[in-house]
Amino acid sequence: AQSVAQPEDQVNVAEGNPLTVKCTYSVSGNPYLFWYVQYPNRGLQFLLKYITGDNLVKGSYGFEAEFNKSQTSFHLKKPSALVSDSALYFCAVRDWRNTDKLIFGTGTRLQVFP
Amino acid sequence: DTAVSQTPKYLVTQMGNDKSIKCEQNLGHDTMYWYKQDSKKFLKIMFSYNNKELIINETVPNRFSPKSPDKAHLNLHINSLELGDSAVYFCASSQAGGVYEQYFGPGTRLTVT
């Protein structure tokens, strides 16, 4: 079965420091991976996706993600965190059996302290 | 302009009632979805429609019935509401035929008392 795992419920980082939010995947075939962010009382917003090609994917708000096939990981990164980045982050993978379907991880709460 | 909109934003109702949530997208997308986010923030797909045709129907009680009058609208009707139905329901839409991201509505917080 296809799945993504987000091993950390919460990540704390000081403003200005680099941040990493971890995601590992388990898929049959080529993985199509996504990151979304959810601010309080809002819907999810798309950040970036990996389809194929360059292992470093750049997205919205200065975020990027690194695809690592050998480690089956797709970690979200940002060089310098902002307090406004504090939110809930979801990793997702497209289901190969039903390409309309996204399978989401359990979410990681990012807290950036001033 | 709001890309994906849902009404109402909040819905408080008693057990046993029937309620509907409406969703509209103005992005010209062919595919629309309903998701349920529980109190632990776990997000799970319920249904998807492509151009008014039901594509995904996850293991959802048949008290939940989606209806798509046209490809810009996907409504969710819930019969005989139960306490466990309390959650935030999100509508989303995307283009079809490739690896496209989904655009989410602001959510409807349903509370069943």
Image (cartoon, grey):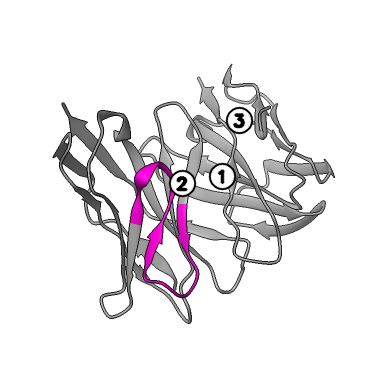
- In the image, what residue type sits under mark 2? Leu
Residue B12 image position (x, y, % from top left): 56, 17
Are the residues flagged by discs 2 and 1 in contact, CB closer than 8 Å?
Answer: yes
Position of B37 relative to A24 (above/below) = above
Residue receiving disc 2: B43
Residue A113 image position (x, y, % from top left): 16, 29
Residue receiving disc 3: B81
Q: CA distance from mark 2 to mark 1?
A: 7 Å
Residue drawn at x 23%, y 39% is: A81
Residue A63 magenta-drawn?
yes
Lower sequence index among marks 3 and 1: 1
Lower sequence index among marks 2 and 1: 1
Q: CA distance from mark 2 to mark 3?
A: 20 Å
Judged left or right of residue A49, residue A114 is: left
Residue B41 image position (x, y, % from top left): 39, 40
Chain under label 2? Answer: B
Q: Secondary structure at mark 3?
A: loop
Residue B94 magenta-drawn?
no
Judged left or right of residue B109, residue A64 is: left
- Specify start and end residues of the magenta stretch as a single range: A48-64
Judged left or right of residue B74, residue A15 is: left
Numbered mark located on residue B35 in the image: 1
